[in-house]
Amino acid sequence: MDNKRGKGLSFAKRIYAPRTIGLGIGSFSVMAALYPLNVPLWIWGLLLFNGFIWPHLAFVLSTRSAYPFQAERRNMLLDSVWGGFWAASMQFNPLPTVTILSMMMMNNVAAGGQKMLIRGALAQFTGAVLSWLLLGIAFNPDTTALQIYACLPMLTLYPFAVGMVSYRLAIKLAEHKRALSTLSRTDSLTGLLNHGSWKDLLQLCFQQSQDSHMPATLALIDIDHFKQINDTYGHIVGDSVLRRLSHELKENLRTEDLAGRYGGDEFCVILPNRSLAQAREIMERLRQVFGNYQHADDPELRVCVSLSIGLAACRPEYQNASSWLNEADKALYIAKNTGRNKVSIGAADTLSEAALSNSPE
């Protein structure tokens, strides 16, 4: 309910400025068309009310309504009634009539599409019928120079006002779209890439490394005995540990390194243009820094936290990114099954390092 009301208020605020400008300058077009017709005095009073009081009254009515969006849509239909009334009252003088009714049609289409356009047209016809009943039916095909000049502000300033509102709305929508895109790609707890986004980037990085023959290393990180931390200290502390690891990853990695939450207590990092030796040094530093964990809300609380990390270099013989990921997973398995709290590499990388160390200089 509060969200809907907030959106309705935002809609009413967007309409307020164009309505104030449009009805204000539009009233001069109507005045120029009514002046030669010798209309009753009360018509002039009604025109002043519609041009200079109604925009503010409409805004108050919509913002004070329990349902501002619906109230503003009703106000727009009333605008159309006014438009039809003035078109008939000035005897359908061609230029002022087309100017006023077309601008209102533009408003209706922008606010509610075809459905609102049809409703607005019916409202304009209703307004014209009211004018005929009060003033009679007449048609004046002659447009004077004064009436042409009186329509010029409406034809220039009002589209400018509507364009500015549309531009600001487009900017706001683009910002929301970027925010939603970011939310869809990131893990809500840690702020790192989520599983799906990271897997997509893994495939991209793998292909780039294979095509360019540049080194890249993949790291899988597991928080040792994380379930025991949750069971002993509670999930609040557990979540704090996850957030701390994500913070350390951001602090210790480059902008181009891609860190994500793979699932649960497992994290993953793609390190493009990093050799296995360079990646091992980075991960060792991360492991040591993370071992000095302190709970943010309770510095006295000491939680024993360690990391097991598996590394795998991107190798030419891998057919796809899954093979690369599988090798890093094997390296992580080695780290977890040989004492934990260490950085390990897979069998393929171990053999490669051994071959390099045994090769003659």
Image (tube, rainbow, N blue to C red):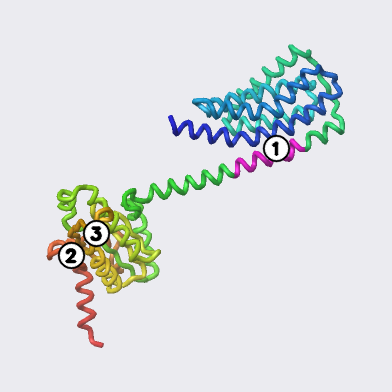
The image quarter containing residue 137 is top right
The answer to whether residue 115 of the structure is visible from this angle is no
The image quarter containing residue 265 is bottom left
Residue type pointed to by label 3? Gln
- Asked if disc 3 and disc 1 are in contact, CB closer than 8 Å, the reply is no
Instruction: Identify the image quadrant of the C terminus.
Output: bottom left
What x and y, as percent, mark residue 280?
26, 70
Instruction: Report the mark closest to the observer, 3 or 2.
Output: 3
Residue name at image x 60 percent, y 23 percent: 119
159 magenta-colored: yes
Label 3 or label 1, whichever comes before in sequence order: 1
Read off the residue under disc 3.
294
Examine the residues drawn in magenta and state their main secondary structure: helix
Label 2 or label 1, whichever comes before in sequence order: 1
What x and y, as percent, mark residue 283?
27, 67
Residue that lies at the very extreme toward the left in this rendered image: 338
- Asked if disc 3 and disc 2 are in contact, CB closer than 8 Å, the reply is no
Label 3 or label 2, whichever comes before in sequence order: 3
The correct choice, above or below, for 163 with respect to 348 in the image is above
Residue name at image x 81 percent, y 24 percent: 34
Read off the residue under disc 1.
158
Residue type pointed to by label 2? Asn
Disc 1 crowd, CA 10 A, few/some/many (<14, 14-19, 20+): many
Secondary element under disc 2, as helix, strand or loop, is loop
The segment highlighted magenta reads 153-167
How far apart are the two marked residues, 2 and 1, measured between alpha carbons?
Answer: 68 Å
Residue name at image x 87 percent, y 33 percent: 145
How far apart are the two marked residues, 3 and 1, measured between alpha carbons?
Answer: 61 Å
Q: Which mark is residue 341?
A: 2
Secondary element under disc 3, as helix, strand or loop, is loop
203 magenta-colored: no
Which of the two residues, 278 or 33, is positioned nearer the viewer here?
33
